[in-house]
Amino acid sequence: MTAIDHVGIAVPDLDSAIAWYAEHLGMVSTHEEVNEEQGVREAMLSVVGAPEGSTALQLLAPLNESSTIAKFIDRSGPGLQQLAYRVTDIDALSAQLRDRGVRLLYDAPRRGTADSRINFVHPKDAGGVLIELVEPSAGH
């Protein structure tokens, strides 16, 4: 692991959330995309002037009622959903974690934001926290 990559927040309305963080905290959207596989529309926000590679805020809005984020909001309401760590080799780290008895949500990494590769540590193995492992794409 090299850094805390981002903190993920589940929101019912992405545009309203982006506007709130801009108006009240002066944050700017640095990346937005739709991830059909994950069932989300998402935005990465940053503090104005933050250096490249700084920890970001990820806003996640559901694309439909069956998405994981929609279920999270129904169960827990909007709010903190996950903590993501930046890693250099997700395959090696995943194998190491499994060897230590840690459960991961996916058998193999999936596509995340900006073509990153991601997996998640099961919250029951991480003190109730959903931990995302993020290996950035070569371009990021």
Image (cartoon, rainbow, N blue to C red):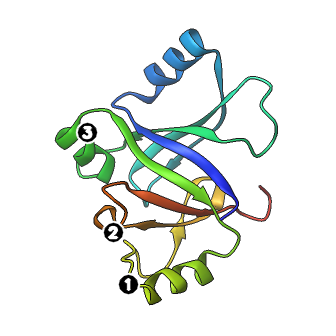
Measured Cα–Cα span from mark 2 to mark 3: 22 Å
Disc on the earlier residue, 1 or 3: 3
Circle nearer the viewer, 2 or 3 = 2
Q: Are marks 1 and 2 in contact (CB under 8 Å)?
A: yes
Q: Amino acid at mark 1?
A: Gly
How far is the residue under mark 1 from the one under mark 2? 9 Å
Q: Name the amino acid, label 3.
A: Ile
In the rendered image, which quarter is residue 32 located in? top right
Q: Which comes before the other along the chain, label 2 or label 3?
A: 3
Question: Which numbered disc flags the more N-terminal residue, 1 or 2?
Answer: 1
In this rendered view, identify the residue nearer to me: 71 or 36: 71
Which residue has dot 1 on it? 101
Dot 2 amino acid type: Asp
Look at 24% across and 52% down and name the residue there.
66
Viewer-nearest residue: 128 or 36: 128
Above or below 129: residue 118: below
Tell me the distance, in whole angstroms, between the alpha carbons under discs 1 and 3: 29 Å
Report the quarter where the C terminus lies.
Answer: bottom right
Q: Quadrant of residue 13?
A: top left
**Mark drawn on residue 125:** 2
Residue assigned mark 3: 73
Disc 3: CA contacts within 10 A as few (<14), some (14-19) or many (>=20)? some
- x%, y% of residue 110? 51, 70
Q: Nearer the viewer, residue 2 or 106?
A: 2
Among the 4 quarters of the image, the one containing residue 47: top right
* Label 1 neighbour load within 10 Å: few <14, some 14-19, many 20+: few
Q: Is residue 112 above or below residue 101?
A: above
Give the secondary structure at mark 2: helix
